[in-house]
Amino acid sequence: MATITNPDPSPSAPAFIPLEANPELMTSLLRKLGLSSALQIHDVYSITEPELLAFIPRPALSLLLVFPVSAMYESLRLSEDAGVDEYKGKGEAEPVMWWKQTIRNACGLMGLLHAVSNGPAKGFIETDTPLSTLLAQSIPLAPTERSALLEKTPALASAHHEAASQGQTAAPDAQDDIDLHYVCFVKTDDGTLWELDGRRKGPIARGNLEANEDVLSDKALLWGPLKFLERGGDDMRFSCVALAGSLD
């Protein structure tokens, strides 16, 4: 079996204040970075009750899941990653945009970047903004170079710090060890449902969705968030937010 190294950034790596799963703050952060006001982040109150899913504009373009990093999850992650090479994709032909996380406690930001930089959502990034510049600079780079770019983008760090400092709960310290993590699910233009997580070895294709299915469809929820819930045991610290049309 291949040796798996710890995927988390080292203690000496740059660190951000953890981002609260707060739709208002996340939307404000994304718009400050350059996302059109036509989209916003929405609370997903349930992934099993259709009447609650009905409150979210459809199609939902991406889904962010916050979940506890349990021993069971880590065991399954290690097993799944064991036979996989580190992702080296780059360039315009790349099927999906993915960044490896090298900034501690930045998984919320990574999730948001993955959410808006893939599938139809990337068409809502306004020109001449920090997001459009970051995406254009990232496309030709290998994953390690992309990570270095994120670390050296002041506009990203500044906007994130402002948002993370304004949560409804007291913000943890940037150097704190946090056992909650974000993962992003997006449907790209070819119908592929991708799991995008900067802690993994690369993007993971989970299956193909039909034209009328989005990240909140039954099939996508079964391949994505519901699998994480099954692994959670008695720890129910799960929450979801979705990127979809604005209600403003």
Image (cartoon, helix red, strand yellow):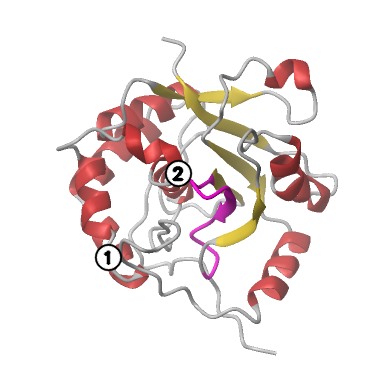
Q: Residue furthest top?
A: 248
Residue 77 in sight from this viewpoint? yes
Mark 2 and mark 1: Cα distance apart in space: 24 Å
Q: Residue furthest left?
A: 128
- Tag 1 residue: 148
- Tag 2 residue: 119
> Which span of residues is magenta-colored?
187-201
Label whose residue precedes the other's in the sequence (2 or 1): 2
Q: Quadrant of residue 171?
A: top left
In the rendered view, does 230 fall on the left or right side of 96? Answer: right
- Three-letter residue code for mark 2: Gly
Query: Mark 2 falls on what kind of element?
Result: helix
Of the 4 image quadrants, the one containing the N terminus is bottom right
- Three-letter residue code for mark 1: Ala
x%, y% of residue 121? 41, 36
In the rendered view, does 85 fall on the left or right side of 144? Answer: right
Front residue of 182/204: it is: 204
Front residue of 192/104: it is: 192
Query: Mark 1 falls on what kind of element?
Result: helix
Assess disc 1: are there few (<14), some (14-19) or many (≥20) residues with their C-alpha within 10 Å of its C-alpha: some
Give me the residue at 78% from left, 44% from top.
235
Give me the residue at 57% from left, 38% from top.
63
Q: Residue furthest bottom?
A: 1
Assess disc 2: are there few (<14), some (14-19) or many (≥20) residues with their C-alpha within 10 Å of its C-alpha: many
